[in-house]
Image (cartoon, helix red, strand yellow):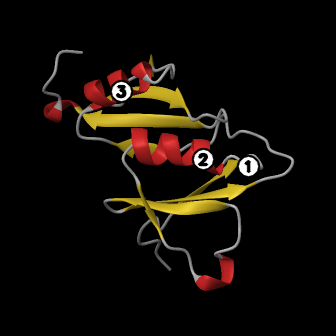
Amino acid sequence: MTILSLQHINLPIPPDGDKLAREFYVSLLGFEEIERPESIRNRKGGWFSAGSVNLHLSEQDPFVANKVGHPAFVVDDIVKLAERLRDADYNVSDDATFVGYIRKTTHDPFGNRVELMQPEDMVQHKL
């Protein structure tokens, strides 16, 4: 048996957090909302996609933010994305660099940790 790939990651959102989640993941991070299967279409949350990355958000009650376990999204312009997040009043901090990557950390509107990474050889703007 061999694991071939990661199909999706699921993050919790609080009850009635759908609107804020869409503002963060779609408007700021650039995900596109995709249609869920008919059997779960009435559930709160949503399914999103960006390139080969699939993200599912599910309502959790009682809600507990995912502060340690987190997605690490590889992006093509970490400087611009960090500026966009800061302009929207999100804190973005530098993170210890993996060999070959620039890393930054932020949190979604609910406190879920989100890591952003860009290969060092792709960085075009001054950090």
Disc 3: which residue: 84
Q: Nearer the viewer, mark 3 or mark 1?
A: 1
Distance from disc 3 to disc 1, alpha carbons, whole Å, reads: 25 Å
Label disc, if present, on residue 16 of the rendered structure? 1
Residue sitting at x 62%, y 42%: 69
Give x and y (percent) for residue 17: 68, 46
Q: CA distance from mark 1 to mark 2?
A: 8 Å
- Indicate the secondary structure of the residue bearing disc 2: helix
Q: Position of residue 53 (x, y in %)?
A: 40, 59
| Residue 86 seen anywhere in this rendered image of the structure | yes
Residue 65 lies in quadrant: top right
- Looking at the rendered structure, the kind of residue marked 3 is Arg
Q: Are marks 3 and 2 in contact (CB under 8 Å)?
A: no
- Compared to residue 113, the image places residue 49 above or below, namely below
Label 1 close to label 2 by CB (< 8 Å): yes
Q: Which residue is mark 2?
A: 19
Q: Quadrant of the C terminus?
A: top left
Select label 3 or label 2 by which is in front.
2
Q: Tag 2: residue type?
A: Lys
The three-letter code of the residue at mark 1 reads Asp
Classify residue 66 as left or right of residue 125. Answer: right
Label whose residue precedes the other's in the sequence (3 or 1):
1
Q: Is residue 17 left or right of residue 92?
A: right
